[in-house]
Image (cartoon, helix red, strand yellow):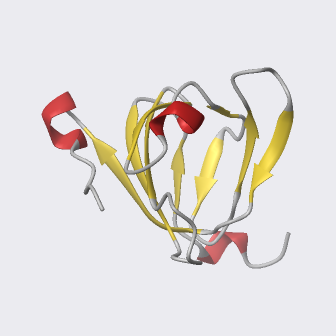
Amino acid sequence: MGGMKDKEHTPNTGRIKVTFRDDEQDCLEWILQDGVVVDCDMQRWMWVGTRVTQQELWIGDGLDVVFQDGHTGTWKHPMVKIEKLEEAKDATVVRH
């Protein structure tokens, strides 16, 4: 993949807040704990428990996921911000 060295990336471990480009989807932010969605700004019932399979998260990429029911898919909305969170209190998701 050309140009990957120029993009910002983060290992998919620990507690991470991922912000997605606003493509008019309902959900703009996920909180991941070791690659699993533990909170989000909308539709918690749908996303919490979803597993992100990438070992590295890259700004500009979508996410390959395994949903709670076991089927796989791709969250196509690119990540625009990736924040490493140190404490659970930092994991506040903006509610819309």
Choose top left, top right, bottom left or bottom right for residue 18: bottom left
Q: Position of residue 12 (x, y in %)?
A: 55, 38
Q: Position of residue 22 (x, y in %)?
A: 51, 76
Give whichever of 85, 45 is nearer the camera: 45
Above or below 73: residue 23: below
Left or right: 46, with 1 as reference point:
left
Residue at image location 66% in from the left, 70% down from the top: 5
The quarter of the displayed image where residue 40 is located = top left
Q: Nearer the viewer, residue 21 or 5?
A: 21
Give the residue displayed 85% in from the left and 69% down from the top.
1
Please state the total of marks drawn on the protein image: 0
In the image, residue 41 above or below residue 14? below
In this rendering, position of residue 44 left or right of residue 51: left
Task: Specify whether 67 is left or right of 93.
Answer: right
Please report the residue visible at 61 percent of the width from the left and 77 percent of the height from the top: 6
> Residue 34 vs residue 7: left or right?
left
Q: Nearer the viewer, residue 1 or 76?
A: 76
